Image (spheres, rainbow, N blue to C red):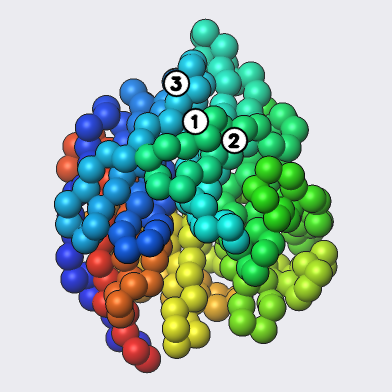
Amino acid sequence: MATPELVSLTKIWDAAPHNAFTDLLRFGDGWLCTFREAESHGHCPATIRVLRSADGDSWSSAAEIEEAGVDLRDPKLSVTPAGRVMLLTSANFFAPDGRYRTRSPRVAFSDDATNWTTPTRCLAEDHWLWRVTWHGTVGYSVSKLGIGNNPRRGMLYCTTDGLSWDFITEFILPDDIWTASETTVRVMPDGEMIALIRPDWIGSSQPPYDEWSFTRIKASLGGPNFIRTPDGTLWASARGRSATDEPATVLARMTRDSYIPALVLPSGGDCSYPGMVWYEGLLWMTYYSSHEGRSSIYLARVRLPSD
């Protein structure tokens, strides 16, 4: 099979000591990129930065979202059925000595990506809604739920406004393995929902999405994301391993029961958590990496093979 081609790669942000956990959105006639800024990877206060670009080449800060003393993590962008930008993130709380205390999801909205509503809590403590995918007027998201700082139960929820969420089902993995964590779901044209699940699962379900089948894949994913391109192909990205078995951001071909790495992007160390958008014949990806020093935000443009 032909290999994807890296067309361009640009470092677009490195202002904070640690810049990480990205998402990318095409909004109106421009681009939005969001990520976490902090002193380190975790267990410290953190803010959410939103960047704006008209062309993908020049980027500037549009907003900074914070909650005093709180670690805001894993921001995700989407456009609601009402046409507003929605930012979904997790608010993690730690004791002064760094021990985990609790967490809960936060959601904020904007019409222009600069002026945001105050982040509002949704769901109960210990939930962590990760990425929302809108299908018609309904948004779907998997919450990784668990007591402590290592949540490993996946709960599928739906919403019509981003504020109130209704439970659909729990992901019951084969052999009652409780390993479901960060999850991206997408709805196919025929209504089938497919889920890419950290660390090593792909799930599929038909409406009303309360019964699932799961396939374990030969990969160890971190920050998984995937999209469906216009030709019907699924392309996924996550933290994986390079040819020398080092951490790297990997682009992979995907089906409902397979994940086949196809391209290792320039990356290493603390890295991954990609945003993915198909635009004008190219796959646009943001991700973070520390292969050039401090963890920084990168934008890649990739030409995908037609086979």
Q: Which mark is residue 45?
A: 3
Most distant residue in the top direction: 96
The disc labelled 2 sits on which kind of residue? Arg
Task: Determine the CA span between mark 2 and mark 1.
Answer: 9 Å
Q: Relative to 204, is 23 above or below?
A: above
Q: Nearer the viewer, residue 231 or 152?
A: 231
Local SS, label 1: strand
The disc labelled 1 sits on which kind of residue? Leu
Q: Which mark is residue 118?
A: none
The disc labelled 3 sits on which kind of residue? Pro
Residue 159: % across, % down: 71, 53
Q: Are marks 2 and 1 in contact (CB under 8 Å)?
A: yes
Q: Quadrant of residue 103?
A: top right
Residue 215: % across, % down: 66, 69
Local SS, label 2: strand
Q: Quadrant of residue 31?
A: bottom left
Q: Residue at x 63, y 40 (%)?
A: 128
Tell me which numbered mark, 2 or 3, is placed earlier along the sequence.
Answer: 3
Q: Quadrant of residue 29?
A: bottom left
Q: What residue is pinned by disc 1? A: 72
Local SS, label 3: loop
- Any part of residue 248 in sight: no
Residue 76: % across, % down: 49, 48
Q: Residue at x 67, y 28 (%)?
A: 148
Query: Mark 2 against mark 3, which lies toward the viewer?
Result: 2
Most distant residue in the bottom direction: 307
Tell me which numbered mark, 3 or 1, is placed earlier along the sequence.
Answer: 3
Q: What residue is pinned by disc 2? A: 106
State left or right for residue 27 relative to residue 156. Answer: left
Query: Mark 2 against mark 1, which lies toward the viewer?
Result: 2
